Image (cartoon, helix red, strand yellow):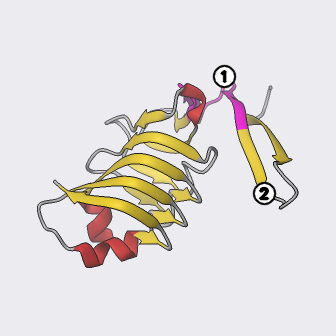
Amino acid sequence: MSGACFRLFSYSKYKNSDREFESKLERLEVDPNNKHFVSENGAIYSKDKSRLVCASTIGGKSFTVPDSVKTIDNYAFCTNLNWDRVIIPGGVKINGGSKLFEGNNIEYVEIPAAMLEARDTVFGKCNIKRLVIRSKAKNENDVKYIAYNCNIEECVFE
């Protein structure tokens, strides 16, 4: 892998005659000698772990963004479509202000109030069973900004 930043190993196939597409990330690697990136538990980070480049369900279908992370790249959670639980701590910003999730099915996701207040689109075309927003201000109108064209069964402000 000499000279490569990182490599993703995946497969894609059609699931049925309706041309439903399935894609699954099987493995990701970062060269241990890489000066800019590191991989850990199915995720790729900047070397100092202040930036999350992408997260996958390789390390399990639950993912908690480490406290060291300050920014998350666009579409960071799009490599696998089905998540049981994702927790994003306070103080984290989306790098570029675009979607983190696109077309995902998520059982439970917890985001900080800052993501709601920034009005960045966090979710696009997702099915979310339970969305927890760590904010005392219950402004449900703001949810439409962070969740574009999504089906949210339950939204809770804590």
Q: Residue at x 55, y 66 (%)?
A: 125
User: Residue 65 occupies which quadrant of the picture?
Assistant: top left
110 falls in the magenta region: no
Name of the residue lying farthest toward the front: 17
Q: Evaluate if marks 1 and 2 touch, with contact meaning CB atoms under 8 Å apart.
A: no
Name of the residue lying farthest toward the bottom: 141
**Side (left or right) of 106 relative to 69:** right
Name the residue that disc number 1 marks.
Answer: 33
Three-letter amino acid code at the position of disc 2: Glu
Residue 16 drawn above or below residue 98? above
Q: Residue at x 47, y 63 (%)?
A: 123
Q: Residue 53 in the image: x percent, y percent?
A: 55, 45
Name the residue that disc number 2 marks.
Answer: 20
**Side (left or right) of 24 relative to 152:** right
Name of the residue lying farthest toward the top: 32
Q: Residue at x 55, y 50 (%)?
A: 76
Residue 74 visible from this viewpoint? no
Q: Kindly state the secondary structure of the residue where label 1 is placed.
A: loop
32 falls in the magenta region: yes
The residue carrying pointer 2 sits among few (fewer than 14), some (14 to 19) or many (20 or more) residues within 10 Å by Cα, namely few
Q: Earlier in the sequence, mark 1 or mark 2?
A: 2
Q: Which residues are magenta?
A: 25-43
For this rendering, which residue is in front, 47 or 94? 94
For this rendering, which residue is in front, 20 or 55? 20
The residue carrying pointer 1 sits among few (fewer than 14), some (14 to 19) or many (20 or more) residues within 10 Å by Cα, namely few
Q: Residue 98 in the image: x percent, y percent?
A: 50, 66
Dot in front, 1 or 2: 2
Q: Residue 88 in the image: x percent, y percent?
A: 35, 45
Q: Residue at x 69, y 25 (%)?
A: 31
